[in-house]
Image: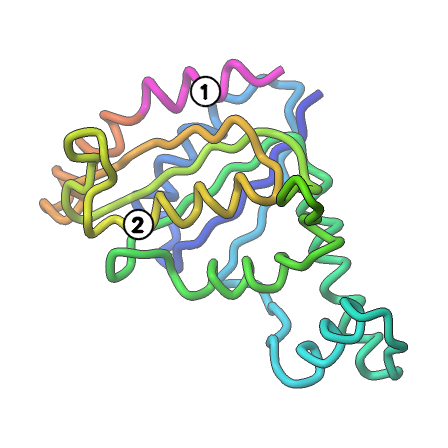
């Protein structure tokens, strides 16, 4: 049985191209798969402010946390435990200003701490999560790789691939849903074009 953790980074609900594509992936999952959802724009994520920053520094240096710091740090470890419990990760990520929505960056900053999602030694950085990932990128235009290199305006894929790799996920499958700003028909065509890849990836999970 495969547990899928679905992280949705769009606030647009059913109107979102990335959400529509993710729904196609979910519909193609084997019946034995379980799905846990995290709609980031509907989630009350803790703010990474002064208390959490102090708690992180103390955890990294082995210092004792006060009661308030300990309570806030427990929120972080609960989020990390939720994240690392999955076998496969599905991310629906629209492009905002060539990059990722701020809610997803907020979530990543809450998760990314030494000793929780990665470690470092003389041989480099080692991820403490495990499993594979499918990342759906929806874009208004075409930001496909050019001449074997990322598009110079694509700050979505290089950043998320680097982060997902750092925390230990492999393989990372990327699905492009592009030219979504070409009206309703254009969006439907973009989502439809990605469907065969999404069905293939989802049906392979056992």
Could you tell me which quadrant the N terminus lies in?
top right
For the point 46% across and 44% down, the residue is: 162
Q: Nearer the viewer, mark 1 or mark 2?
A: 1
Q: How is the image coloured?
A: rainbow
> On residue 27, which mark appears?
none
Give the alpha-carbon distance from disc 1 to disc 2, as whole Å: 23 Å
| Residue 141: x %, y % from top left | 14, 46
Looking at the rendering, the stretch of residues picked out in magenta corresponds to 195-206
Q: In terms of secondary structure, where does tag 1 sit?
A: helix
Most foreground residue, 33 or 140: 140
Q: Quadrant of residue 20?
A: top left
User: Is 131 contained in the magenta span?
Assistant: no
Could you tell me which quadrant the C terminus lies in?
top right
Most foreground residue, 113 or 19: 113
Count of marks, rendered view: 2
User: Is 199 contained in the magenta span?
Assistant: yes
For the point 53% across and 39% down, the residue is: 165
| Residue 150: x %, y % from top left | 25, 40
Q: Residue furthest left?
A: 182
Q: Residue furthest front?
A: 122
Q: Earlier in the sequence, mark 1 or mark 2?
A: 2
Depicted 180 relative to depicted 62: above or below: above
For the point 73% across and 74% down, the residue is: 57
The local crowd at label 1, few if under 14, some if 14 to 19, many if 20 or more residues have their Cα within 10 Å, is: some
> On residue 15, which mark appears?
2
| Residue 172: x %, y % from top left | 47, 31
Depicted 36 relative to depicted 111: above or below: above
Q: Label 1 belongs to which residue?
A: 201
The local crowd at label 2, few if under 14, some if 14 to 19, many if 20 or more residues have their Cα within 10 Å, is: few
């Amino acid at each position: 049985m495969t547990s899928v953790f679905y992280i949705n980074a769009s606030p647009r609900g059913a109107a979102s191209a990335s959400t529509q594509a993710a729904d196609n992936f979910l519909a193609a999952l084997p019946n034995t798969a379980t799905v846990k959802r995290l709609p980031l724009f509907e989630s009350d994520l803790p703010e990474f402010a002064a208390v959490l920053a102090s708690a992180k520094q103390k955890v990294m240096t082995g210092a004792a946390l006060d009661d308030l710091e300990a309570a806030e740090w427990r929120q972080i470890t609960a989020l990390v435990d939720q994240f690392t419990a999955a076998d496969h990760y599905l991310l629906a990520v629209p492009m905002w200003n060539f990059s990722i929505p701020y809610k997803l960056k907020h979530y990543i900053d809450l998760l990314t701490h030494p000793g929780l999602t990665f470690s470092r030694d003389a041989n480099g950085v080692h991820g403490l999560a495990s499993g594979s990932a499918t990342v759906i990128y929806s874009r208004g235009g075409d930001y496909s790789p050019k001449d074997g290199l990322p598009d110079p305006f694509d700050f979505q894929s290089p950043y998320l691939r680097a982060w997902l790799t750092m925390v230990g996920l492999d393989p990372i499958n990327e699905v492009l849903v592009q030219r979504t700003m070409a009206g309703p028909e254009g969006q439907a065509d973009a989502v439809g074009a990605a469907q065969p890849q999404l069905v293939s990836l989802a049906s392979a999970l056992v």
